[in-house]
Amino acid sequence: MAVPVQKTDNVTSLPGPKASAKAAEIVALPTRKSDGKGKKILDQLKGIAATTVPPLLVLGVLLLVWQIGFAQPGASLPAPSVIWAEAKDLILDPFFVMGPQDIGLGLRVLTSLERVAIGFGLAAVVGVLLGALVGQSVWATRGLDPIFQVLRTVPPLAWLPISLAAFRDANPSAIFVIFITAIWPIIINTAVGIRNIPQDYRNVAQVLRLNTFEFFFKIMVPSAAPYIFTGLRIGIGLSWLAIVAAEMLTGGVGIGFFIWDAWNSSKLSDIIVALLYIGVVGFALDRLVAAIGNLVTRGTSAS
Amino acid sequence: MPAYLKLDHLDKSFIRGGQTTEVLKDISLTIDQGEFVSIIGHSGCGKSTLLNLIAGLTQVTAGAVLLENREVNAPGPERAVVFQNHSLLPWLTVYENVKLAVEKVFSGKKSRAERHDWIMANLDLVQMGHARDKRPSEISGGMKQRVGIARALAMEPKILLLDEPFGALDALTRAHLQDSVMDIHARLKNTMIMITHDVDEAVLLSDRIVMMTNGPAARIGEVLTVDLPRPRKRLDLVSDSRYIAAREAVLRFLYERHRLVEAA
Ligand SMILES: Nc1ncnc2c1ncn2[C@@H]1O[C@H](COP(=O)(O)OP(=O)(O)OP(=O)(O)O)[C@@H](O)[C@H]1O
Ligand SMILES: [Mg+2]
């Protein structure tokens, strides 16, 4: 009965957020009734402390080691104290505007995010539709799947020259690179999700005579939602990887170009601050998609 | 008068990789409107396949299924199915599961308020109105099966097809649901075809019991008419000689003449 499922390393079943949610639950200690409210608040504080103190501690130790290791003059990389001294304004004020090319990192990140939003948004829509097509039809799978499997291994930047040639403009090219990078895991995971729709649901749809449109929105998408969100989560991560690289080459005011610019003017401290921004934003994006996924697929995984 | 539902010399074989498996062979049967018919037979003989043919979920290899003299070869809500494993959509609540069916079947015919009342009426019929906002994962197996029945009934089907609806339930819940189904059948008088493994269930519920021979190429071995007055009460029947005779007939068919031969 079951169509053989293509095993790809992109296919995982969203274990991340659930696992971490479990971990958080374990930390929340059971409250005893007799101790009242004070005890409860104390327990909650303990719970928060248990998740925040260890990473802060490790961070502190790393900064210390870094500071000691690179403190002597002539070190190849700036020590944290030097970074703070040189790039304090970048860290403290993300949204300043001093001129067309001299703006805060927060604003730069926002420009990059806008590109990601467009590119990734397009990839999500087109990816889910194509994935549905591929998952639904044996012939589409046979014809398209090998092509997808080859194309998805092409590194994001390899697409850039072609897209520059095609669009003759930096901004659409960067967006296209995002799109083409993010779309493969979305297609592949959606297709697997569609192939895994239980025959029972299809039978229900058939008995009710749902049309293609109703079947897509009422059965396919909700049923494949956990897979789709796995794809979206991988996709948003890849988008963020690709945007920085693409912006380095296309210029503009994005965070990627900022790094390139800082490198050309040997402002290593600025680069390190920018890396920090990129990491934090990437992390937030991943968590955002995961959270939306959890919200949407609440009912789907259990039956 | 022509038959309400007519199975006319049905054959069904599956072809996979050049190999043909003959599952059903020359099945002919007529069923009257309002009749309750059970299909019983050993596992793997092709009961679900037969039900799927009537539902239109699979296509006949030869022969035809005729409902009111019209051939059916595609699924539709006038032949609602209660599936073996409830098949509720897990991302919808109990209410929404029934709503999906009602919206589709009655979209032009009932107003929004009427549709709501109709959904609730069907949930209440199976005593599930109180759990309308629960998701399938939050209710018990018996409750899920009931919602499945409510969903099927809400389509106002001409024929209700039940594929081992109580197979996965414990004996008490099972008895309870059997009573509900008898009750619903008495009230709505719709035609029901039920697959079962359970001899007592078949005798208790059915007007006729269709006994199938073992596959491959299973046929209808015997059709037994259960001549018991309705409403039937399970406790009264235990000592009823007609009940005992019917039970014995089915048991003899299944375990004497058509024992499941393991090697086959
Ligand atoms: N899609 C299919 N392709 C090939 N063979 C099939 C298919 N569906 C069913 N069969 C075969 O048809 C036979 C009858 O299957 P079916 O599911 O109808 O049995 P059943 O009587 O409902 O059994 P059970 O009581 O265990 O549910 C089996 O031998 C099965 O292998
Ligand atoms: Mg079966």
Image: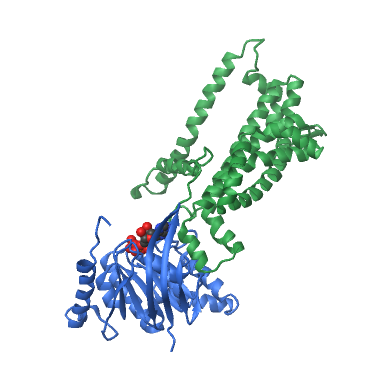
Where residue B99 sits: x, y (%)? 52, 70
Residue placed furthest toward the bottom: B1
- Image position of B235 with respect to A61: above or below: below
Q: Is residue B209 left or right of residue B94?
A: left
Q: Residue at x 26, y 67 (%)?
A: B171
Q: Name the spot of residue A157 as percent of width and height, x first.
A: 69, 31
Name which residue lies at 23% across and 73% down. Answer: B250
| Quadrant in the rendering for residue A120 | top right
Residue that appears at 56% across and 42% down: A287
Residue A216 rendering spot, x and y as whole percentages:
58, 59
Quadrant (top left/top right/bottom left/bottom right) for the C terminus of chain A? bottom left
Rendered view: B5 above or below B131: below
Looking at the rendering, which quadrant does residue A22 occupy? top left
From the viewer's side, name the closer residue of A67 and B261: B261
Q: Colour of chain B?
A: blue
Res B181 seen here: yes
Q: Is residue B137 visible?
A: no
Colour chain A appears in: green
Looking at the image, residue A252 sits to the left or right of residue A195; the answer is right
Percent position (x, y) of residue B11?
41, 68
Q: Nearer the viewer, residue B217 or A272?
A: B217
Image quarter (top left, top right, bottom left or bottom right) of the N terminus of chain A = bottom left
